[in-house]
Image (cartoon, helix red, strand yellow):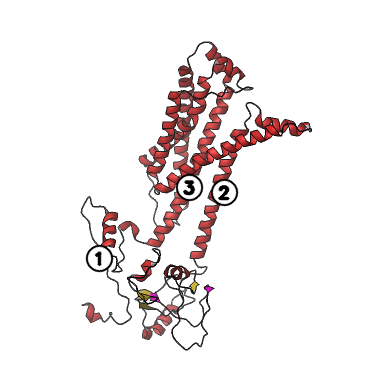
């Protein structure tokens, strides 16, 4: 039947698809990796159902990484806000806590009393956040329903809401237990003096262990629920290092202010004294501002990189439709038919042929040593074209374009990334997503 259609002609684009349905319990990713390993030299494109379009998947992966960073940043800044708020809240109740301690209230009673209040406030905040987040999602879905390629499915999803609530609870515990444990451990008399002469007490061993457990559980939850676990783990490690760095910077600032505290001008002397005096909030402000500005700068830079990358990959003027495998004797009829359609203002034709790279610098393609990112171009046939002048948007990064009336041995222009991966010198960089340059 296929032979009778006479579609299989020299130069025709032919693609064979084979779909495999795996039995229950078989990992699709593992099966696909085993196929790629077993048939590495065949040039097959092996994809699972969730990898239908690699370009879209790459974009979604980048967008997911950006959203993950934004979410983790908000979590970190919110946690610091929790710690700062709890500390200020306890400072406002220092007289009450000191009075209870002087009256003989055990540290455990004070700790549990104020912990229950913090948990109640955290539960209220989590509830408001869940309701507000769901409401914003519903409003955004209604506003963007006409622009989305698929209709949004609005429903109540308990699992994500429970996960968000768990994030909020662990964040509150991880950042609130330290000031709570410290306030409960200081004696009554010392707590009265704490505003002018901080006692420097640490939480008790049990509270410290509980604090570490809450922080470890939060890190574990972040890594376990992230799409890119190494990225999430790296963010957690970087956040801990940043907190330590800014805390060390605050100590260094206080030490420097103490050394410069003998200035003659009273305003400068008093200002520097406030940076290192007992009870100074300088350390807390340095950590809070430093983390906030660092995360803001990181998000701004990543967003800028994504915008530039999208702008570089997407041409300013892209065709609404493209057609392939138009034979030479069909080109004029196709142009006339397309231009006769309402709304069609321009039709451009680009010569195209298929070929396979058989050798690189005289070395067979199967034996050539190329980078992993460019090895795909040696597998299977590739689309080629030819042109007398550089197409619009082409940027020459090395070498030169041949004259329009060139007659001589064939010359080649390639994508700069592929040329570098193959160890070639001259290359052409094009903003298009074609595997070969013009």
Q: Specify the quadrant that holds the N terminus.
A: bottom left
Q: Where is residue 125 drawn, in percent x and y?
A: 48, 33
How far is disc 3 from disc 2 in space, using C-alphas? Answer: 12 Å
Disc 3: CA contacts within 10 A as few (<14), some (14-19) or many (>=20): some
- Residue 69: mark in rendering: 3
The residue under label 2 is 297
Label 1 or label 2, whichever comes before in sequence order: 1
Q: CA distance from mark 1 to mark 3?
A: 38 Å
x and y percentages locating residue 266 in the rendered image: 77, 31
Q: Nearer the viewer, mark 1 or mark 3?
A: 3
User: Spatial distance from mark 1 to mark 2, Cα to Cα?
Assistant: 47 Å
Residue 395 among those drawn in magenta: yes
Task: Tell me if residue 433 can be seen.
Answer: no
**What residue span does the magenta drawing correspond to?**
383-399
- Mark 3 or mark 2: which comes first in sequence? 3
Residue 264 placement, left or right of 187: right
Q: Secondary structure at mark 2?
A: helix
Asked which secondary structure carries label 1, the reply is loop
Question: Does 369 sit above or below residue 66?
Answer: below
Q: Is residue 373 visible?
A: yes
Q: Which residue is mark 1?
A: 18
């Amino acid at each position: 039947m296929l032979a009778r259609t006479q579609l299989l002609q020299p130069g025709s684009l032919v693609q064979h698809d084979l779909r495999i349905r795996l039995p229950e319990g078989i990992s699709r990713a593992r099966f696909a990796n085993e196929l790629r390993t077993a048939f590495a030299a065949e040039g097959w494109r092996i994809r699972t159902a969730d990898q239908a379009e690699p370009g879209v998947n790459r974009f979604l992966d980048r967008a997911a990484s950006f959203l993950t960073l934004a979410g983790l940043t908000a979590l970190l800044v919110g946690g610091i806000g929790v710690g700062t708020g709890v500390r200020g809240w306890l400072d406002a109740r220092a007289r009450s806590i000191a009075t209870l301690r002087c009256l003989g209230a055990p540290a455990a009673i004070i700790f549990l009393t104020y912990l229950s209040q913090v948990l109640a406030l955290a539960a209220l905040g989590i509830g408001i956040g869940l309701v507000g987040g769901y409401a914003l999602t519903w409003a955004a879905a209604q506003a963007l329903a006409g622009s989305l390629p698929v209709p949004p499915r609005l429903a109540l999803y308990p699992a994500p809401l429970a996960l968000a609530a768990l994030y909020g609870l662990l964040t509150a515990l991880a950042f609130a237990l330290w000031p709570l444990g410290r306030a409960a451990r200081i004696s009554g008399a010392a707590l009265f003096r704490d505003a002018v002469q901080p006692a420097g007490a640490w939480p008790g061993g049990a509270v410290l262990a509980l604090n570490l457990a809450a922080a470890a559980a939060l890190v574990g939850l972040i890594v376990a629920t992230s799409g890119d676990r190494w990225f999430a783990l790296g963010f957690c490690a970087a956040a801990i290092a940043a907190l330590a760095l800014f805390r060390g910077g605050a100590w260094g600032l206080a030490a420097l202010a103490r050394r410069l505290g003998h200035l003659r001008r009273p305003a400068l002397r008093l200002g520097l004294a406030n940076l290192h005096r007992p009870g100074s909030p300088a350390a807390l402000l340095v950590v809070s501002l430093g983390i906030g500005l660092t995360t803001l700068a990181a998000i701004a830079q990543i967003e800028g990189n994504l915008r530039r990358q999208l702008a570089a990959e997407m041409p300013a003027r892209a065709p609404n439709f493209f057609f392939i495998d138009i034979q030479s004797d069909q080109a004029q009829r196709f142009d006339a038919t397309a231009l006769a359609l309402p709304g069609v203002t321009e039709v451009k034709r680009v010569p195209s042929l298929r070929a396979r790279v058989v050798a690189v610098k005289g070395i067979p393609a199967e034996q050539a040593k190329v980078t992993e990112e460019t090895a795909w171009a040696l597998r299977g046939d590739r689309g080629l074209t030819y042109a007398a002048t550089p197409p619009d948007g082409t940027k020459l990064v090395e070498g030169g374009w041949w004259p329009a009336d060139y007659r001589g041995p064939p010359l080649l222009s390639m994508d700069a990334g592929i040329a570098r991966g193959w160890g070639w010198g001259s290359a052409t960089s094009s903003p298009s997503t074609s595997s070969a340059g013009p």
